Image (cartoon, helix red, strand yellow):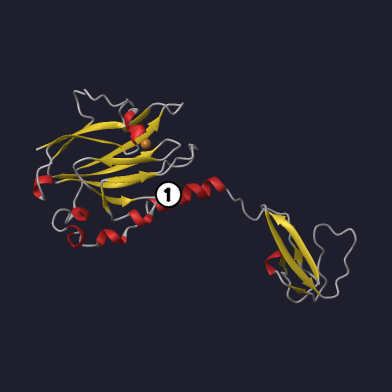
Amino acid sequence: MIACSTLVAGFAVTYALQGTAQIPSSSSVCPRPPAGSVVNNPPEIRNPDASNPANFTVLDPLRTIAIIDTQAQLTAAAISSASASAPELNVDLTEVSGDRFSGLNQENPVQQRTLYFSENDTGTVFYITVLGNQPKVFDPNFKTPDITVEEGTTEDWLVQNRAQEAHVFHIHQIHFLVLESPDPSEIGTLRDTIEIPTWNGDLNTPFPSVKLRMDFRGAQKDTSIAGTFVYHCHILEHEDKGMMAAIEVKS
Ligand SMILES: [Cu+2]
């Protein structure tokens, strides 16, 4: 038996030839197997002429059989995990929450928003920004809330992490239903806090994100949530360095 091996697209490929092969000393990477030999790895050998077993073709073992783009794999993985379907969303939420969150998964959101966590280049100033607005540090004496919503509605928020460290989205006063997450175990859960994993800094890679059904139904379900409150990164150092914003729920 003669073991043949080569590298194809960075991976070692080994196959074996059996029989009474005469191996030319000038043979390149792997010898041409003799007629009648048993080839253990048919994909490397093609014999288009079954009537004449001597007429086979040995394909170049160094040929490119695949181009493996590791970045593309990461991208595909990120996309598929973030858009994983969520069988949990079909559950009756009354079973886990009583009436308070029932029907949240069936609501039609009145608004879609994208928010994102980001930092300055030196990682000393922190922002949470509604897409379309300018990033700014939180002003505790703000005059205008960053987001205004109507009580009695639901909205879907895509929250991205555009920073190269993890951030944790937290909102006061209400809860949300996790619709999409890189962590499938979080999908379908009711929360007021969720971590968004670190972005790898490659602009070809989607920002890690979660999609949340925000429940502003308030008085419809429980007690009124009308008023102004905040959402922020739950890592206190980040929050204190600007990563906080205000929302007003109008009754
Ligand atoms: Cu943070």
Q: Indicate the position of residue 157 as horizontal and vertical percent values.
A: 28, 42
Mark count: 1
Q: Give the amino acid type for the residue marked by disc 1 in the picture.
A: Ile
Q: Is residue 5 left or right of residue 224?
A: right
Q: For mark 1, what is the residue?
A: 79
Q: Is residue 130 left or right of residue 43?
A: left
- Eyeballing the image, is 133 above or below 214? above
Q: Indicate the position of residue 132 as horizontal and vertical percent values.
A: 31, 30
Q: Indicate the position of residue 35 as horizontal and vertical percent values.
A: 81, 74
Between 154 and 233, which is closer to the camera in this rendering?
A: 233
Q: Is residue 62 left or right of residue 249?
A: right
Between 71 and 175, which is closer to the camera in this rendering?
A: 175
Point out the image quarter for the C terminus. top left
Identify the residue at horizontal 9%, vertical 43% (top origin). 224
- Eyeballing the image, is 162 above or below 136? below
Label 1 within 8 A of ligand 1 by Cβ = no
Please tell me whether mark 1 sits on a helix, a strand or a loop.
helix
Identify the residue at horizontal 73%, vertical 61% (top origin). 59
Q: Indicate the position of residue 50 as horizontal and vertical percent values.
A: 73, 75
- The quadrant where ligand 1 appears is top left
- Eyeballing the image, is 82 above or below 31? above
Identify the residue at horizontal 71%, vertical 69% (top origin). 48
